[in-house]
Amino acid sequence: MADVRTFGLPDRIEGTESDLRVADEVINAWLADGMVRITCDRWQARKLEDAVDVGRRYFEQPVHLKSRCVSELTYAGYSAAGAAEKFTICRDIPREDVRVGAGWPCHGPVPWPSIEYRRTMRLLTDELGRIGEKLMHLLGIGLHLPDFEALAAMTEDGWHHMFVQRLPSGAHELSSHGLLMITVENGTLTVTPGELLEFLTNGYLPMTPLEAQVNTSSELVMSYFHEPAFELGLRPVLEPAHGHLHYGTYFTDLFMRRHPDRAATQRIKAEDRLSVLASLSKRASVGA
């Protein structure tokens, strides 16, 4: 891990020779090491520190208070497995939104613990989203796509989400799903390709399994996933472009398997929300 390359990202990415050089270096580092690190300025570092502080204080609350933060509409909120605890932050979709009314799976408001938690975590996810967007542009340049903005366009209005986790001491395998993962551990940002990026590049950029080493019970590990839009159909951007994937189906299937007993899973089944998903997937396959 000591030899992992560290990069500072440009303020703006416009497809210049300088951008191409950085893009090639990032991709080569991914191919060599499976990951890169991103430097933070002092404002970004402050947002990280604030998020860690508010996340730690939430997990220190009694279980009966933490466990109130669950939803029957979305996989956002609190969950626990043994000594491991997690707060999942998904897209915060108001109940009045037409997609919630139409029964789209996984759509609904986040059951925030407090106004402070919501504000602090939104500031962080917005910041990580800006980093993810820059990396998507750099990927498009480094892969020499005809339209270098094509990958970034996939993540406009993306289904970005984040895990805030308190894990017991020891080594823990982290999820490698999704497009691009930014892991926050001990104040460091580590970026790794997810299984969707492997699919989109026909295996050129393979998914990187990632492990967190937790030394004390007070440490937090946060994993941000920079994702495509929920309703989007995906095909590989590198030839041969075989296969098709609907992101909303991918996400819903993944979380239903991981959380078979969650209220959101039971409601998806009871209200046949999978038929809504099938309709979205069919519509996406036409335009993909």
Image (cartoon, rainbow, N blue to C red):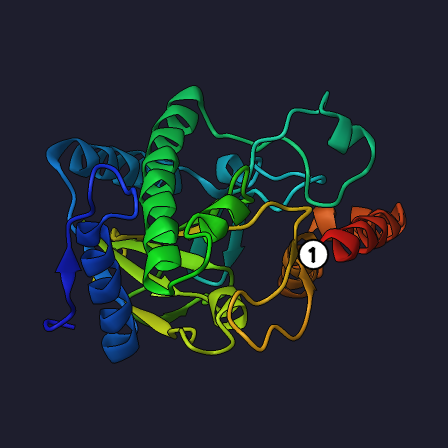
The residue that appears at 80% across and 46% down in the rendered structure is 267
Q: Residue at x 81, y 50 (%)?
A: 283
Dot 1, how many residues are within 10 Å of its Cα: few (below 14), some (14-19), or many (20+)?
few
**Does 63 sit above or below residue 216?**
above
Q: Position of residue 281 (x, y in %)?
A: 78, 54
Q: Position of residue 66 (x, y in %)?
A: 49, 39
- The answer to whether any part of residue 222 appears in the image is no
Q: Is residue 110 left or right of residue 288?
A: left
- In the structure shown, which secondary structural element does the residue marked by tag 1 occupy? loop
Above or below, 256 relative to 113:
below
Left or right, residue 244 beside residue 111: right
Question: Is 233 displayed left or right of 55 in the figure?
Answer: right
The answer to whether residue 141 shows anywhere in this view is yes
The residue that label 1 is drawn on is 288
Question: 202 or 157, which is in the foreground?
Answer: 202
Residue 189 locus on image (x, y percent): 24, 53
Image quadrant occupied by the N terminus: bottom left
Image quarter where the C terminus lies is bottom right
